[in-house]
Image: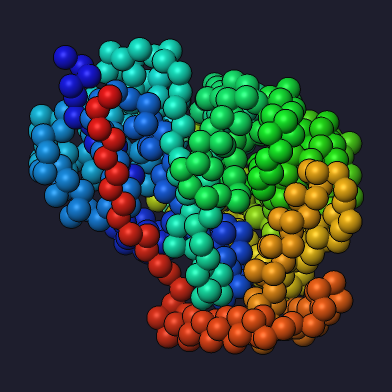
């Protein structure tokens, strides 16, 4: 009987972010530290994220399922021999191809009874079933696939697990509470930008897990009951694109007098369509925005004055993470600086640079492959977007791409000051722009900013002390002055907190100097009993 199956769902094994036979040092298992603030040393926020998709699948199967997150190879083998699993599902992305292949070999050796399922973006690798010994490949959405495979009802409503956004978080050595929840309202995006693997992987359409604003609200209410929360990180490529659902959510929040801080990914056209006032009312405090480049060819940024949009968002307290693509066809060694300048001029709080990346199954990949531009001899471990480009660019060798990318990140830090400082400034803008608000939603937003400003304040002194250049030191002093003007000079409690933050930051700075700043996530095992 299918539902009696024992399933193991696993992420790939560590260590991560080291040069070894299975991976590269650029693939740190962290978000900000590997692709956003990677050159900002002590000032780079350190967050670890569980492999959300696996928990989502597990929560939605009737079968007895174990999720093994961040195992070592040895821990993986131990798990394989601990229980007679019927299926082992390996989730991997393309640069972790060799790890997935090794894990499949280990399954065959230590759990020969188990069927192997490959899933995640690595499954888009051409002919993956010939390259890795496996029984099933899931190319796309996993819940439906697994339910079908196990003979379960595929149309059963989706249940969303309550998971922390991140764990083992810290900022400049100061531990931060895991006080937010991840929400995955759906996968995919219909915009189908030619480089975008998440759009192409899900067949260029949106697959919702929550269909209505009411369903989202019910999840938030449950999450709030189960754990205290303040922030909701919305893992959805383009949440605002489902406009009526977002409007329904706002209506529910207003009806119940609830206020949460939302972190969203969005395209510029979707922001423009709903407007900043809507974002404020909804509770958006962080926006990940595809800026792409000054002369972006994409519909989503067409006719949008992006720097003006970023200014408007920051002025009302919305922290912006602007994402820019380098090494496009229009970049040569001179014009690439126009887009790096553009990123800096955008004034975003955080800036992510990604290399143009022809991921398998994207239109970009098909075009480059047809034109013979792909460096298919380059091992998949190198295909990660933070060092070498894996296509022939007329103006950049892979080694030059590495240097230009590093310099771009460094310029952001040198010329804008650290990203966290900008975010703390934006938070103050949020506080000031809602001061005296009488409307209930904006008053709730004001409370949120008041709380957040107080918790950020001690970090400002740390930035001033450890500033890496004059601009950053002066900028920190300026933001401190703005805070003191808004809240008055710090009292005894704030002074004590500053002293603690300074001590922890000094320890962290010494740790970075002496042993480096790589940290591995711990193994997490979660069991989902049969239902
Ligand atoms: C969170 C995240 C991370 C986290 C990873 C946390 C973790 N524990 O793994 C962090 C920040 C550490 C990270 C790092 C990196 N990431 Co990342 N990341 C994401 C992100 C933003 C969200 C993933 C997610 O949770 N999605 C929501 C869930 C519901 O979707 P899902 O994971 O795709 O899962 C669904 C299906 O794919 C499928 N599925 C997935 N696994 C399995 C397994 C089985 C058995 C089955 C049946 C189905 C199945 O079912 C799920 C439900 O439908 C995606 C972009 C995105 N929006 O998806 C990029 C993304 C996955 N990352 C990517 C990359 C390139 C990286 C880095 C290499 C970046 C870098 N240059 O360093 C590193 C690699 C780190 C490492 N050592 O592995 C690429 C992968 C590209 C590719 N084609 O392979 C993506 C798609 C971003 C992009 N557009 O470029 N990342
Ligand atoms: S708008 Fe964003 S998520 Fe949608 S296809 Fe374009 S890059 Fe991908």
Instruction: Count numbered badges in the picture.
Output: 0
* Residue closer to the observer: 487 or 19: 487
The answer to whether 210 is drawn above or below residue 487 in the figure is above
Residue 334 visible in image? no
* Residue closer to the observer: 336 or 43: 43
Which quarter of the rendering shows the C terminus?
top left
In which quadrant of the rendered view does residue 436 lie? bottom right
Q: How is the image coloured?
A: rainbow
In which quadrant of the rendered view does residue 58 lie? top left
The answer to whether 73 is drawn above or below residue 409 in the figure is above
Left or right side of 411 for 528:
left
Q: Report x, y in % for residue 458.
A: 66, 77
Q: Report x, y in % for residue 430.
A: 80, 57
* Residue closer to the observer: 166 or 388: 166
Q: Report x, y in % for residue 50.
A: 42, 48
Residue drawn where x is 86% and y is 44% of the image: 439
Residue drawn where x is 67% and y is 48% of the image: 261
Residue drawn where x is 16% and y is 14% of the image: 1
Left or right side of 334 for 59:
left
* Residue closer to the observer: 311 or 152: 152
Left or right side of 507 for 322:
right
The answer to whether 367 is drawn above or below residue 289 in the figure is above
Residue 15 visible in image? yes
Q: Report x, y in % for residue 355.
A: 61, 50
Residue drawn where x is 33% and y is 44% of the image: 11
Left or right side of 349 for 6:
left
């Amino acid at each position: 009987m299918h539902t009696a199956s024992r399933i193991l769902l696993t992420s790939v094994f560590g260590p991560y972010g080291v040069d070894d036979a299975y991976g590269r040092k650029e693939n740190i298992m962290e978000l900000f530290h590997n692709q956003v603030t990677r050159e900002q040393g002590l000032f780079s926020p350190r967050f670890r994220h569980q492999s959300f998709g696996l928990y989502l699948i597990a929560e939605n199967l009737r079968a007895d399922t174990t999720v093994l997150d961040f195992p070592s190879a040895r821990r993986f083998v131990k798990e394989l021999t601990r229980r007679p699993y019927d299926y082992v599902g390996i989730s991997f992305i393309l640069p972790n191809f060799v790890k997935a292949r090794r894990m499949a070999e280990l399954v065959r050796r230590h759990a020969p009874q188990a069927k192997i399922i490959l899933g995640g973006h690595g499954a888009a690798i051409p002919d993956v079933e010939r390259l890795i010994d496996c029984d099933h490949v899931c190319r796309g959405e996993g819940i439906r696939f697994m339910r079908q495979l196990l003979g379960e009802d595929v149309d059963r409503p989706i249940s969303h697990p309550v998971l922390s956004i991140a764990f083992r978080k810290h900022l400049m050595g100061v531990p931060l509470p895991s006080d937010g929840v991840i929400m995955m309202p759906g996968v995919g995006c219909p915009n189908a930008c030619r480089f975008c693997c998440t759009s192409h992987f899900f067949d260029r359409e949106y697959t919702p897990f929550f269909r209505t604003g009411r369903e989202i609200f019910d999840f938030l209410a449950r999450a709030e009951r189960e754990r205290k929360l303040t922030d909701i990180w919305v893992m959805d490529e383009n949440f605002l694109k489902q406009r009526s659902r977002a409007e329904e959510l706002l209506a529910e929040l207003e009806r119940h007098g609830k206020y949460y801080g939302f972190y969203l990914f969005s395209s510029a056209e979707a922001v423009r369509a709903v407007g900043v006032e809507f974002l404020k009312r909804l509770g958006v405090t962080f926006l990940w925005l595809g800026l792409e480049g000054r002369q972006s060819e994409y519909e989503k940024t067409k006719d949008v004055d992006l720097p003006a949009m970023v200014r408007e968002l920051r002025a009302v307290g919305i922290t912006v993470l602007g994402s820019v693509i380098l090494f496009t066809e229009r970049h040569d060694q001179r014009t690439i600086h126009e887009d790096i300048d553009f990123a800096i001029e955008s004034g975003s709080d955080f800036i992510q640079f990604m290399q143009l990346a022809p991921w398998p199954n994207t239109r970009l990949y098909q075009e480059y492959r047809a034109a013979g531009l792909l460096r298919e001899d380059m091992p998949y471990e190198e295909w990660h977007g933070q060092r070498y480009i894996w296509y022939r660019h007329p103006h950049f060798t892979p080694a030059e791409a590495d240097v230009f990318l590093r310099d771009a990140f460094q310029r952001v830090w040198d010329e804008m000051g650290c990203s966290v400082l900008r975010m703390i400034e934006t938070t103050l803008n949020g506080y000031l722009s809602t001061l005296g608000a009488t409307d209930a939603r904006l008053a709730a937003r004001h409370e949120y900013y008041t709380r957040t400003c107080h918790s950020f304040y001690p970090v400002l002194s740390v930035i001033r002390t450890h500033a890496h250049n004059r601009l950053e030191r002066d900028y920190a002093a300026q933001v401190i002055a703005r805070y003191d003007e808004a809240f008055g000079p710090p009292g005894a409690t704030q002074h004590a907190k500053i002293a603690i933050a300074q001590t922890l930051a000094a320890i962290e700075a010494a740790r970075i100097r002496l042993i480096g700043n790589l940290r591995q996530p711990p193994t997490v095992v979660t069991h989902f009993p049969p239902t």
